[in-house]
Image (cartoon, grey):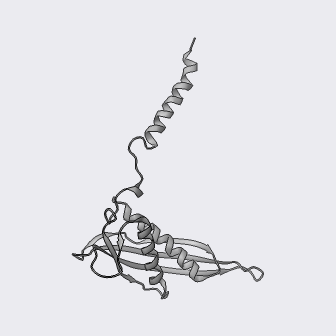
Amino acid sequence: MWSSVRLAPLRAALLCMAALLVLSGCAGYTLSADGPSTLGDGTKTLKIKGVENPTMYANLPHIIRSQVRDEIGARKLAVWKDSGPTDYELQIRITQMTLRRWAGDRQTTAILYSSVMGMEFILYNGSTNTVAWQSGVRYYSDLLDTYDEAAAIKESTKQLVRELTDAMRRNF
């Protein structure tokens, strides 16, 4: 009554379902965002050691400090301290910041900013002053449709800080 020709699609469907179950997380897969970070379990203290800014954008260190503090706090990676002894100190090194303005023709008011930014996080042990982790230089580039140079800088910085903070979660 049941021929092997009719059972072949059923077998294939069952095999696909089994493969999906194994590969979709039922085999012990976890998100890396839920795992431990370079800073530990979120109870360690952290402050910014300094921001090296070789660019001509004088407000860049202030923007970066603010965004790093917000990102670390939002992810609950560490307890933030502004001064005093801490478990870790974060040195931020800006390697590149290029911002170009592109205006449309005379009849449009659209302005595009081309942004390229390079930055590195170096995490020091607060008690021994040795390097505990180093991100390596990461770059972010984008075309930003905004009227304001400061908004373009903030958006580029925010995206790069997010990427570098993500890298603190990866322990490989």
Residue found farthest to the top: 1
Quarter of the image with the N terminus is: top right
State left or right for residue 147 relative to residue 69: right
Residue 88 lies, in percent from the top left, at 29, 73
Quarter-wise, where is residue 163 in the image? bottom left
Quarter-wise, where is residue 109 in the image? bottom right
Q: Is residue 110 above or below residue 11?
A: below
State left or right for residue 83 relative to residue 94: left
Tally of marks: 0
Residue found farthest to the right: 107
- Residue shown at the point (45%, 78%) measured from the top left: 66
Residue 17 lies, in percent from the top left, at 50, 34
Quarter of the image with the C terminus is: bottom left
State left or right for residue 6 relative to residue 42: right
Q: Is residue 72 above or below residue 19?
A: below
Q: Is residue 25 above or below residue 133?
A: above
